[in-house]
Image (cartoon, helix red, strand yellow):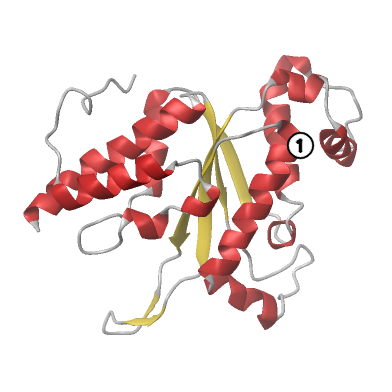
Amino acid sequence: MSEIKYEIPIIKDSIHTFIKNKIGSNSIFSTIEFGFYDNEGYKLPPSIIRKYWDKTEVRKTNTLIKNMLKEAFGINNFFFFIERHSPVLDEFGEIVSEGRFHIHFLTSCINDMAITEPNRRCKRLILYTKAGNAIPYNNINDYKINLFDKCCRQANWINRYNYSIKTSYNKNNSDLRKRVHYCLKNYKHDKQDFMDIIDFDNSSFNKHTTKQLIGEQLCGIAPTKINQESYA
């Protein structure tokens, strides 16, 4: 058991390194929650709310988000993580009910040309923001985040709740590493496995990398210079 605990930080760094090599240090991080009330303050029907506890339904939403962002901005690499909210506990600290799911995901940044020479999907988003073609070039990065969020809000689960999405930039490798480790915070020897947290069906891990991570977890690896990277 102590060997497994020892290897977990190294495996987290292996996951971070793979993601960095795919999307770069300057990347996008987004957290999406699913609310109980719509934007008018009315509670959503149970038929919708109960799906927030269904991981299969959450993965379907991840697939929708990935496809919409890919079509609008040409983003090709995604890494989705599924996490539960805190459970409801009784007076003795025992779990009464598990918390609903929410998601975190990382992508590469949006290329400027995707905004300055938008495709049909992106043009619709620009019109939806009521900004027309007047792009604020002095703050184009904020404009990209605005369009990114608008794109995600096309998914019904997200659009029903004003505070459902929070998106920001990773400015350097240190930011990216902190976000990856945050997404994997429940990956512990006595809690969850990384296979239960990462949505591999919607993430850009290849089969070889997945097998390698599983092998590291089962067999253990020594902390070599490969794992001791700079986070500046």
Question: In the figure, is residue 143 to the left or right of 63?
Answer: right
Can residue 57 be seen at all in this image of the molecule? yes
- Measured as percent of width and height from the top left, residue 11 is found at 26, 42
- Kindly identify the amino acid type of the residue bearing the numbered disc 1: Ala
- Measured as percent of width and height from the top left, residue 49 is found at 63, 75
The number of numbered discs placed on residues in the rendered structure image is: 1
- Label 1 Cα crowd, 10 Å radius (few <14 / some 14-19 / many 20+): many
Q: Residue at x 79, y 66 (%)?
A: 40
Question: In the figure, is residue 80 to the left or right of 50?
Answer: left
Q: Quadrant of the C terminus?
A: top left
Q: Quadrant of the N terminus?
A: bottom left
Q: Residue at x 15, y 48 (%)?
A: 219
Helix, strand, or loop for circle 1?
helix
* Residue 56 versus residue 219 in the image, above or below: below
Classify residue 58 by image quadrant.
Answer: bottom right
Classify residue 61 by image quadrant.
Answer: bottom right
Residue at which label 1 appears: 72
Q: Residue at x 14, y 45 (%)?
A: 220
Can residue 186 be seen at all in this image of the molecule? no
